[in-house]
Image (cartoon, rainbow, N blue to C red):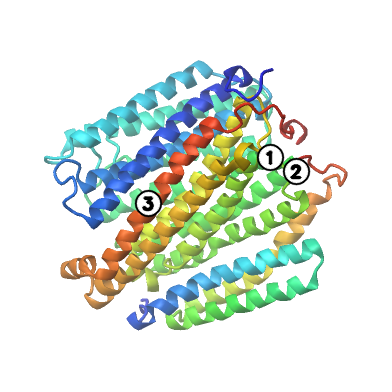
């Protein structure tokens, strides 16, 4: 077998489909960065592209591109591991390929509509064909139905493949999670005229879909990744997967209540949401203990340094972004001031990057290693691996810099807009005009540019890493049973 | 009903909340490393982190007006963070016990 060059003959059917998902994910990642940067410029210079590409459109594309590229990464990662994990060929691969193209064309159409048609009255027609109007979940109704249909096909591929081949602990958790992944998204698809009731269901998608089903999906992907990269035994990762899933659901489901503080739900949500939100960092602390243990036992020896580095970034990014940054402003006594300010944006930037982007990037490197003929990506890479190390540094520096800048802006905003001015419209503008806020937004722009540079370097590295490499990587997955 | 944080306490409340979780992570990480390497000195560091985390939690409870039922949350959190790494450690050790010591992964 040839090594060091991209050759799809090195991949099984599921992996060939996976690299298509990974390729689109990277394009959407770049789009997310680009539109995020445009929105960041508009915070500093509000006239920039006014009436050409307005802030609301840039922000919407920025956020939706993020949600969709994460999904592409997760679906790709599952297709990547499916044949190895089940021991059989993917069932319904042709339908899976068709679903990929349908989804990709739909995403392209939705983005074009976002960019060209965002003015005029909101009515049934626009809800179905332009924008559903729910923050973060703006996809029009036809696209929503399409997403659920594609996830249904994905579920069929996964469940039928495991049913035909062999079931494992990872397979069981993954399959059950995919039911919730498709099902919970439906909670955001019906419109209610009562804003409290509408927000109630909207949070089901934002919190339970993103913070519960995505986290469990990431747990499955991480478990398989640890077996593949570090050679950790199946019994260990599956034991941890069950524990983490139990902790995640135990704290996550009722922890949803911390989103109900200010939408008119009864007072008892203050106690329920506050209590279970306080428990949410525990599974993340457990992951830190686990990773310290495994790192010690396995002495970090492996043949794919970039993938392992991103898995470590995932552990700590998830803990800091979701755990620390979440807990800092979750209790209702604090959240009264911070809810919906740049605090939320600060938490969101670090949590999404740490919990989800990092594990997807780790899988990009796992995929690239096999796509090039299972080559060595450990020490002694050409140029001492400066590109992957540089991308890792720039991306982490950029995201942490944005997080801290938004934290400063959020602190100033919660102080002036909420505490001093009492959440008035005038208070909102007083906070937006304050030099601390504006300086923080300028720093956010600088670190946003650093992050974009990191993504460009990452893409360059993924396209070139291991070219001409002839050394083979150790094989762990087959012996990890 | 809840009593909000006083505006002048903003910096302390955010710092205390962050320090609570960071101290908990420091405790868990140092505890695991101390047990792994069998170093008692690291264990002392771990319990110092826990003490710092507990102090931050108590400060948070005071300035965020965590009264009544909220004090139960505080006690549960402190007990939970104290015991969790012990339980997690036992699970780690039990799940790794079956790993053959001769099967160290190759690589650099």
Assign a secondary structure to mark 1.
loop
Residue at 67% across / 64% down in the picture?
A: B29
- Which image quarter: residue B5? bottom left
Q: Indicate the chain on which mark 3 is placed.
A: A
Q: Is residue A164 left or right of residue A43?
A: right
The answer to whether residue A38 shows anywhere in this view is yes
Where residue A479 appears, x then y in whole percent? 78, 33
The 10 Å Cα crowd at callout 3, few under 14, some 14 to 19, many 20 or more, is: many
Q: Position of residue A318 (x, y in %)?
A: 53, 54
Q: Position of residue A219 (x, y in %)?
A: 59, 45
- Secondary structure beneath disc 3? helix
Nearest to N terminus: mark 1 or mark 3? 1
Callout 1: chain: A
The label shown at residue B108 is 2
Q: CA distance from mark 2 to mark 3?
A: 35 Å
Which of the image's four quarters has the N terminus of chain A? top right
Tag 1 and tag 2 share a subunit: no
Q: Tell me if mark 2 has few (under 14), some (14-19) or many (20+) residues whose alpha carbon lies within 10 angstroms of its own.
A: few
Cβ–Cβ under 8 Å for marks 1 and 2: yes
Mark 1–mark 3 Cα distance, whole angstroms, equals 31 Å
Please give the residue where the numbered disc 1 appears in the rendered image. Answer: A380
Q: In the visual, does A385 lie left or right of A188?
A: right
Toward the right, the furthest residue is: B102
Q: What x and y, as percent, mark residue A99?
A: 43, 23
Q: What residue is at 60 percent from the left and 78 percent from the top?
A: B52
């Amino acid at each position: 077998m040839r090594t060091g060059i991209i050759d799809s003959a090195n991949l099984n059917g599921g992996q060939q489909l996976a690299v298509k998902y990974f390729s689109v994910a990277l394009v959407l990642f770049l789009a997310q960065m680009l539109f995020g940067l445009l929105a960041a410029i508009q915070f500093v210079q509000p006239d920039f592209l006014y009436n050409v590409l307005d802030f609301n459109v840039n922000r919407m594309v920025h956020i939706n591109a993020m949600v969709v590229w994460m999904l592409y990464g997760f679906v790709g990662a599952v297709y990547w591991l499916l044949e190895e994990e089940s021991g059989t060929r993917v069932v319904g691969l042709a339908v899976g390929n068709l679903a990929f193209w349908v989804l990709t064309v739909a995403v392209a159409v939705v983005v074009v509509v976002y960019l060209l048609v965002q003015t005029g009255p909101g009515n049934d027609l626009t809800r179905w064909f332009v924008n559903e109007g729910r923050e973060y979940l703006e996809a029009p109704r036809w696209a929503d139905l399409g997403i659920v249909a594609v996830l249904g096909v994905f579920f069929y591929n996964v469940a039928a493949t495991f049913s035909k081949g062999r079931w494992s602990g990872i397979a069981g958790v993954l399959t059950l999670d995919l039911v919730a992944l498709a099902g919970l998204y439906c909670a955001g698809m019906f419109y209610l005229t009562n804003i409290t009731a509408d927000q109630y269901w909207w949070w089901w998608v934002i919190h339970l879909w993103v913070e519960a089903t995505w986290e469990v999906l990431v747990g499955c992907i991480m478990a398989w990744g640890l077996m593949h990269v570090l050679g950790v035994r199946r019994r260990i990762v599956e034991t941890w997967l069950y524990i983490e899933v139990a902790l995640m659901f135990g704290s996550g489901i009722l922890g949803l209540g911390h989103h109900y503080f200010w939408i008119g739900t009864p007072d008892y949500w203050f106690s329920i949401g506050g209590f279970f939100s306080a428990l949410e960092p525990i599974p993340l602390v457990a992951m830190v203990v686990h990773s310290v243990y495994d790192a010690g036992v396995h002495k970090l020896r492996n043949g794919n340094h970039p993938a392992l580095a991103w898995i470590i970034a995932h552990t700590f990014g998830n803990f800091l972004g979701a755990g620390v940054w979440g807990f800092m402003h979750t209790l209702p006594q604090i959240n009264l001031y911070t809810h919906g300010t740049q605090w939320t944006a600060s938490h969101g930037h670090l949590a999404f990057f740490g919990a989800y982007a990092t594990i997807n990037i780790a899988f990009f490197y796992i995929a690239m290693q096999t796509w090039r003929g299972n080559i060595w990506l450990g020490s002694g890479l050409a140029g001492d691996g400066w590109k992957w190390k540089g991308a890792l540094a720039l991306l982490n520096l950029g995201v942490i810099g944005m997080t801290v800048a938004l934290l400063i802006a959020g602190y100033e905003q919660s102080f002036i807009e909420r505490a001093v001015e009492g959440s008035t419209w005038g208070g909102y503008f007083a906070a937006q005009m304050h030099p601390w806020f504006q300086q923080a937004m300028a720093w956010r722009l600088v670190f946003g540019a650093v992050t974009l540079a990191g993504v460009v370097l990452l893409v360059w590295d993924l396209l070139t890493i291991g070219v001409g490499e002839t050394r083979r990587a150790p094989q762990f997955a087959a012996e990890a049973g | 009903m809840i009593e909000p944080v006083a505006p002048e306490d903003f910096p302390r409340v955010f710092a205390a909340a962050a320090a609570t979780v960071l101290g908990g992570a420091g405790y868990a990480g140092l505890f695991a490393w101390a047990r792994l390497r069998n170093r008692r000195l690291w264990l002392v560091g771990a319990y110092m982190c826990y003490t710092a985390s507990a102090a931050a939690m108590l400060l948070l409870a005071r300035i965020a007006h965590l009264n009544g039922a909220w004090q139960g949350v505080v006690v549960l959190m402190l007990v939970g963070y104290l015991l969790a790494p012990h339980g997690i450690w036992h699970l780690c050790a039990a799940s790794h016990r079956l790993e053959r010591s001769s099967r160290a992964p190759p690589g650099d």
